[in-house]
Amino acid sequence: MIGAVEVGLIYGVMALGVFLTFRVLNFPDLTVDGSFTTGAATAAVGIVNGWNPVLATLAGFVTGAIAGGITGLLHTKGKIDGLLAGILTMIGLWSINLRIMDGANIPLLRQDTLFTPLRDSGILGTWLGVGIIALAVAGLGLIVVWLLTTDLGLALRATGDNGQMITSFGVSTDYTKTLTLALSNGFVGMCGALIAQYQGFADISMGIGLILVGLASVIMGQAILGQRRLWIAVAAVIVGAVIYRVIIFSALQVGLDPNDMKLITALLVIIALVLPRFKSAKSRVFKSTKSTPAPTLEPAMKEA
């Protein structure tokens, strides 16, 4: 269970990236499946070649941001549909990731990583380790909240809400879209770098289906905590990533087939999407029923 919470917190970094595109920009970005592996591959190659783990993790952020920037340019300058632009970048990154790793897998078991001090001291795998990772991820969440409250952040949010309106104020939506996609995939690439260091290897297939995991984290977290305030919405996606990992862990513990995990993820997303709408419809029906006055016999009595 502790390991599931730790992994969930790390995947919260990826959920922050998906939040930027899915909620803030209102953009269906499928680059995530490729940029996650790009960040992991970059960090793994850097660590194997003697880089400092912090530098390798930042390099994962940069390469992920480049991948997101490419999707943004394809969409804004190439006038390619956003969904298709993400798919094209994701497909291209498969070959690029193989080139980066010079193969399909890079082991890191004997290399020093960001988690080596925690593992050597026996902290990793304990609640103290969970607390340390939670503080680090919360720091990234605060950075996202701060960014979205600046003038630039307000422009990014306005681009997702009403692109035509923000264009009338002289803001380039091409720039804001590309920047948001770069930042989003930067977080995804950083998450890939962290996961590679945590699990001890980078693999070409580690990003397959990750966009579904990100959407599950964002949707479930915000369905539970809501998104009344910006900081609550940001915290919710991190909590959602932890909840998702705990659910997957629990499913495996009760004996479900690991091959069914993708199906479970899809069902979780469906439930998280449908349940709020069902509650809303039920609430409207209840209010309309409550507001409709019950018929009385007073008019008939008066006529009589």
Image (tube, grey):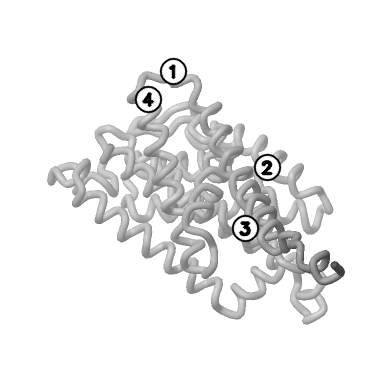
Whole-percent x, y for residue 149 in the image: 54, 76
Whether residue 118 appears in this view of the structure is yes
Instruction: Report the amino acid beneath label 4.
Output: Leu
Q: Residue 23, which numbered label?
A: 3
Q: Residue 174, which numbered label?
A: none
Q: Secondary structure at mark 2?
A: helix
Residue occupying the point 44% across, 60% down: 235
Disc 2: which residue:
89
**Which of labels 3 and 2 is toward the front?**
3
Q: CA distance from mark 1 to mark 3?
A: 32 Å
Q: CA distance from mark 3 to mark 2?
A: 21 Å
Instruction: Report the amino acid beneath label 1.
Output: Asp
Res 33 quadrant in image: top right
Whole-percent x, y for residue 255 in the image: 37, 19
Task: Tell me the quarter of the image containing the C terminus.
Answer: bottom right
Q: CA distance from mark 4 to mark 3?
A: 30 Å
Residue occupying the point 34% across, 49% down: 51
How packed mark 4 is, by other alpha carbons closer than 10 Å (few <14, some 14-19, many 20 or more), is some
Whether residue 34 appears in this view of the structure is no
How packed mark 1 is, by other alpha carbons closer than 10 Å (few <14, some 14-19, many 20 or more), is few
Whole-percent x, y for residue 177 in the image: 69, 62
In the rendered structure, the answer to whether residue 248 lies left or right of residue 227 reads left
**Which of labels 2 and 1 is toward the front?**
1
In the rendered structure, the answer to whether residue 111 lies left or right of residue 240 reads left
Instruction: Report the amino acid beneath label 3.
Output: Arg
Q: Earlier in the sequence, mark 1 or mark 3?
A: 3
Q: Residue 257, which numbered label?
A: 1
Residue occupying the point 51% across, 39% down: 37
Res 159 quadrant in image: bottom right
Q: Earlier in the sequence, mark 2 or mark 1?
A: 2
Whole-percent x, y for residue 35 in the image: 56, 44
